Image (tube, rainbow, N blue to C red):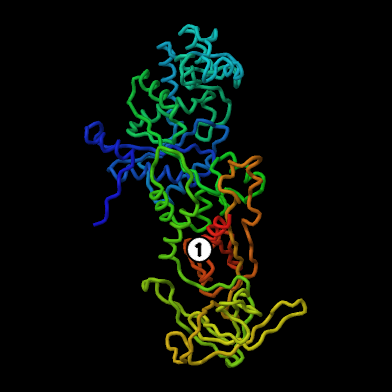
């Protein structure tokens, strides 16, 4: 019997809550801010929140935290929804914090009436100066003693647009000497005269995240509000606001966010990469965004498997990018169609094969018989990889060389008889003879060779552009290095091959199809492809090439 997987700490909490009858069913939420594209770190939160709902027969809401109209756009909303669907999840309700602007305003008024909030006219610098330090208490200012009536009137005037941005803020009245600095009268509303992507110009005051988050959870009756570890200090304010407003007691739980080697997860820094032209947009296959992984050829199954393997922890750590690539290879090995593509072609001419003769050969599409077979057209002139021929072969060289024999994949054994160079010394043609009795599947030649190489028929091959992507950074922790993180960008993160030769079956390639270019790696069709020009992205290599580099160090 297989050993049952142990529960993570959040699952332990949920199971205890259900056993104790605290909830009849659970309700979680995924609350992204629509100010950018989701990245692989968000995938962990998505899989966790939606996974908990599925496991325990509950539901998960998608709630957009759209409280900052300056940075949020409908484009980001649409991309987030597409990414979640692509990962394989369905939300119970699509909600927006802006749905609750009216209710959140009422909550703020309630706090003022309870003398638990006040309007502060101080500048941002003055507020920061009076907040103290972790070792020194903060100080009350003169606005803290405003009357309830005055605060209510000024807050109404703020809502009605009578003040400019930054002139006033609404603060919770808690304790300026509190050991948790976030509890030292935090700002809960600010003035922003900006067009909102959903509410237009209806509002010019907007709730801060710490005020909107817990109250939105409560409005929706979220039972388990799961967020990352940096929000631990915020939990006390989350609970204080719910308690003082006497609303549904949602509760916050924190887990370790995903930190991955050779990757940057900060939206701000990812935006720098885009704006500075280091990458070609948010979906550039070198980026860690889900849209980039999707474009590069990753499967949602591989990402879900990765998130399951790394688990849910309470301590921050770095996950090796190689683990994600391992999950991908495991998945693609089962689903990717095997095809032949020659990335650096050199012509191979079979001198004893009849001119004009063609032959149809059968090749397996993959390791699973259900993947079927395809027909390959074989002829006198072929293309092989330039690296598969060595003029002066090294020891243990099992590929093609003068006088050496090798098998052509799914075809015949050939022997190199001669080769031709151009004026620059570059080999242009390799002349071989073939063994007619050595046909794959019916070989009666009695000849055994150690090497097998791939090929395409020169007469039917199709020209394609192939983009070989590698890791965007050369160091494991780009943000841990001195200086600008962009100084660690890998100058060889993209190699574009303009004139690769691929077998004609790839003319039917679709964006959803995954291919293993035999001996070269896993590839997919890029969105830049046109009917007259196919473009393929390398999704991942067949082996972890970076593991060798780490060993060298």
Q: Residue at x 58, y 25 (%)?
A: 193
Which quadrant: the C terminus? bottom right
Where disc 1 sits, the SS reads loop
Which quadrant: the N terminus? bottom left
Q: How many marks?
A: 1
> Could you tell me if residue 103 is visible in this image?
no
Q: Residues within 10 Å of mark 1 (few under 14, many from 20)?
A: few
The percent coordinates of residue 106 (x first, y second) are 42, 20
The percent coordinates of residue 372 (x first, y second) are 40, 74
The percent coordinates of residue 463 (x first, y second) are 61, 72
Q: Is residue 472 left or right of residue 238?
A: right
User: Which sits in the foreground, 372 or 107?
Assistant: 372
Residue that extends furthest to the right in the rendered view of this protein? 423
> Could you tell me if residue 278 is visible in this image?
yes
Q: Relative to 175, does residue 73 appear above or below in the rendering?
A: below
User: Which sits in the foreground, 335 or 281?
Assistant: 335
Q: Relative to 25, does residue 521 appear above or below in the rendering?
A: below
The percent coordinates of residue 415 (x first, y second) are 58, 87
User: Which sits in the foreground, 452 or 502?
Assistant: 452
- Asked which quadrant contains residue 266, the reply is top right
Which residue matches tag 1? 543
Q: Relative to 246, does residue 94 appear above or below in the rendering?
A: below
- Asked which quadrant contains residue 58, the reply is top left
């Amino acid at each position: 019997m297989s050993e049952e997987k142990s529960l993570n700490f959040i699952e332990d909490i949920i199971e205890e809550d259900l056993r104790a009858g605290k909830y009849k069913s659970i309700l979680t939420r995924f609350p992204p801010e629509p100010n950018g594209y989701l990245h692989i770190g968000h995938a962990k939160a998505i899989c966790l929140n939606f996974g908990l709902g599925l496991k325990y027969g509950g539901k998960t809401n998608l709630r957009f935290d759209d409280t900052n109209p300056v940075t949020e756009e409908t484009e980001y909303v649409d991309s987030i929804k597409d990414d979640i669907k692509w990962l394989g999840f369905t939300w119970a309700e699509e909600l927006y914090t802006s749905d609750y602007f009216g209710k959140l305003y009422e909550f703020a008024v309630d706090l003022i009436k309870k003398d638990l909030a006040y309007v502060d006219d101080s500048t941002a610098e003055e507020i920061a100066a009076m907040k103290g330090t972790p070792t020194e208490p903060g100080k009350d200012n003169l606005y803290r003693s405003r009357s309830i009536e005055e605060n209510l009137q000024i807050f109404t005037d703020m809502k009605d647009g009578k003040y400019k941005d930054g002139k006033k803020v609404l603060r919770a009245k808690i304790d300026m000497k509190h050991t948790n600095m976030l509890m030292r009268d935090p700002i809960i509303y600010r003035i922003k005269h900006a067009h909102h992507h959903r509410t237009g110009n209806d509002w010019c005051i907007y709730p801060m995240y710490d005020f909107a988050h817990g109250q939105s959870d409560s409005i929706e009756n979220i039972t388990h509000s799961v967020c990352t570890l940096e929000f631990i200090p915020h939990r006390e304010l989350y609970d204080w606001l719910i308690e003082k407003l006497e609303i549904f007691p949602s509760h916050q739980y924190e887990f370790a966010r995903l930190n991955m080697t050779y990757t940057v997860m900060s939206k701000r820094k990812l935006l720098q990469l885009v704006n500075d032209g280091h990458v070609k947009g948010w979906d550039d296959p070198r980026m860690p965004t889900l849209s980039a992984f999707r474009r590069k050829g990753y499967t949602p199954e591989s990402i879900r498997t990765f998130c399951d393997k790394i688990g849910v922890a309470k301590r921050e750590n770095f996950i090796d990018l190689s683990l994600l690539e391992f999950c991908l290879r495991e998945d693609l090995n089962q689903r990717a169609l095997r095809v032949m593509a020659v990335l650096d072609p050199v012509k191979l001419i079979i001198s004893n094969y009849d001119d004009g003769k063609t032959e149809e050969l059968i090749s397996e599409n993959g390791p699973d018989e259900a993947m079927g077979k395809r027909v390959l057209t074989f002829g006198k002139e072929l293309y092989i990889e330039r690296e598969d021929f060595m003029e002066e072969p090294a020891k243990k060289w099992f590929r093609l060389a003068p006088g050496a024999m090798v098998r052509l994949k799914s075809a015949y054994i050939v022997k190199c008889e001669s080769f031709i160079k151009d004026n620059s010394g570059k080999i242009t043609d390799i002349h071989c003879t073939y063994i007619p009795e050595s046909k794959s599947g019916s070989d009666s030649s009695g000849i055994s060779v150690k090497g097998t190489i791939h090929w395409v028929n020169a007469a039917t091959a199709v020209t394609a552009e192939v983009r070989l992507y590698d890791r965007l950074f050369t160091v494991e922790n780009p943000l841990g290095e001195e200086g600008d993180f962009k100084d660690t960008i890998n100058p060889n993160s993209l190699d574009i091959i303009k004139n690769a030769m691929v077998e004609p079956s790839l003319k039917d390639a679709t964006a959803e199809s995954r291919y293993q270019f035999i001996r070269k790696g896993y590839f997919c069709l890029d969105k830049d492809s046109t009917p007259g020009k196919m473009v393929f992205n390398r999704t991942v290599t067949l082996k972890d090439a970076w593991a060798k580099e780490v060993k060298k160090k």
